[in-house]
Image (tube, rainbow, N blue to C red):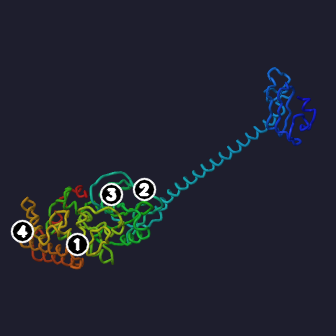
Amino acid sequence: MEQLVSSSTNLCSWQGVKECKEGRVTKLVLEHLNLTGSLNGLVNLKIIYLDNNKFNGNAGLCGEQVKKPCPGTGTEPGLPSLNRKSNKKTKLIIIVVAASVGGLLLFLLCFLCFIFIKRKNKSTNEVKRNKGVVEAEGVEAGDGGNGGGDGGSGGGGGFWESEGVGSLVFVGAGDQQLSYSLEDLLKASAETLGRGTMGSTYKAVMESGFIVTVKRLKDARYPRSEEFRRHVELIGRLRHPNLVPLRAYFQAKEERLLVYDYFPNGSLFSLIHGTRTNGGGKPLHWTSCLKIAEDLASGLLYIHQNPGLTHGNLKSSNVLLGPDFESCLTDYGLTLFRDPESPEELGAATFFYRAPECRDIRKASTQPADVYSFGVLLLELLTGKTPFQDLVQEHGSDIPQWVRSVREEETESGDEPTSGNETSEGKLQSLLNIAMACIALVPENRPMMREVLKMIRDVRAEAQVSSNSSEHSPGRWSGTVQSLPREEQLSI
């Protein structure tokens, strides 16, 4: 083999070599030659045939094809050296590619960790920032508020979370700073007070022991953020002895909260119906009805003095009892936050408090509609009956007779709502006349709240002049509200 290769450096001159370009041998056929020696490196050689050369037993033949190193070299000569170079190059490429992929993955991992840490720090800083920059209002010790929603009660731990970027904004003016922050509110334990058409209401007890009422609105995306802010700040500026004050609000991407004072004495619904769930309760004494009616009319008139503003959801569960058992309206002005395209329908009781022209949830509330709801609520005070039906359609012009029959049933059962004297009958009739005027089917025929309040105050003045009975004393009203167990008043 050595003689064959060394005999001519020009392989194209070999016998049997065809179509050869000088120095460019790529295919070599060496059959039946019983070769010995070594195969030198041929750079361009791609194919070599050494068939039928009886490699076994040819001690003189060395090289990769016979898997035997050539003597004196320690390495495989010729063609194997080319393969080693190719293998080294392949290994180098694999190492470079693997290192590149590994480096890219490491970079992505570091980038994701950086984003996660940055977002976490941003959330923490937002909470801390709210703690220091929010302007707050004051509340007297002992003030609070309970929910004005419909339905049952329950309990639970802290439940709300700060979704996205948001801050606790305090509204109103003239109050001293409150001693809680967004962080305190988010950590507060929560007890469900009620669930209604606008959302759920909770009693939130902070770690400091301070208590507030939090309403979690059902529609967190309606209306748009700026419109929500303007309207809630308008509501927050309302301050009246017969309104539950809105203290603060919070809005983020998927969360809207309203923060009110907490009223531990419960709602008007609990005063009338106690723990009964069938809507049946005891009629209140006419003096109690008169006191409550004056409080509610005064609060409604104050709301209506703001152009275009309405309560929109007046019912007994949205009336809370203050520290002196004064009646205070809550959940006023919130109907703007209800999506008119929402498929949800009003509950039976809520539906029949509303004026006929506003029972379609897509229609905006009006001030005459508030007057209608006030009339229905006054009838609830006089009868102890929740309006699970349209009272006008059910009783029509016989409503006064229906009211009297209900009160007579209570008298026969031993619970006497009226003494039966002429003064009581006269004042009862006066209250019925006011209620009937308020529930007129035609909105234009209903009195304005200014007129309603004047009529109620005239009745109270006449009662004080015409009678010296002890039932007209403040003690009669105080005895009515204090006869209920305090815990029972919390059920809504």
Is the residue 466 above or below the residue 3 in the image?
below
Q: Earlier in the sequence, mark 3 or mark 2?
A: 2
Residue type at the position of mark 1: Tyr
**Callout 3: 10 Å neighbours few (<14), some, many (20+)?**
many
Whether residue 447 is visible: yes
Is the residue 83 above or below the residue 480 in the image?
above
- In percent of width and height, residue 193 lies at 30, 57
Residue type at the position of mark 4: Gly
What residue did someone put label 2 on?
161
What residue did someone put label 1 on?
372
What residue did someone put label 4 on?
420
The answer for how far apart the CA atoms under marks 1 and 2 are is 39 Å
Q: Earlier in the sequence, mark 4 or mark 1?
A: 1
The residue closer to the viewer here, 409 or 224, is: 224
Foreground disc of the pair 1, 3: 1
Q: Please state if 65 lies on the left or on the right of 287 as rendered.
A: right
Q: Are marks 4 and 1 in contact (CB under 8 Å)?
A: no
Give the quarter of the image for residue 369: bottom left
Q: Quadrant of the N terminus?
A: top right
Element type at mark 1: helix
Q: Are marks 3 and 4 in contact (CB under 8 Å)?
A: no
Q: Which mark is residue 211?
A: none
The structure residue drawn at horizontal position 82% and vertical position 33%, both measured from the top left corner, is: 29
Is the residue 10 above or below the residue 460 in the image?
above
The answer for how far apart the CA atoms under marks 3 and 2 are is 16 Å
Q: Please state if 333 lies on the left or on the right of 282 as rendered.
A: right
Residue type at the position of mark 2: Glu
**Callout 4: 10 Å neighbours few (<14), some, many (20+)?**
few
Q: Earlier in the sequence, mark 1 or mark 2?
A: 2
The answer for how far apart the CA atoms under marks 1 and 3 are is 30 Å
Q: Which mark is residue 203?
A: 3
Element type at mark 3: strand
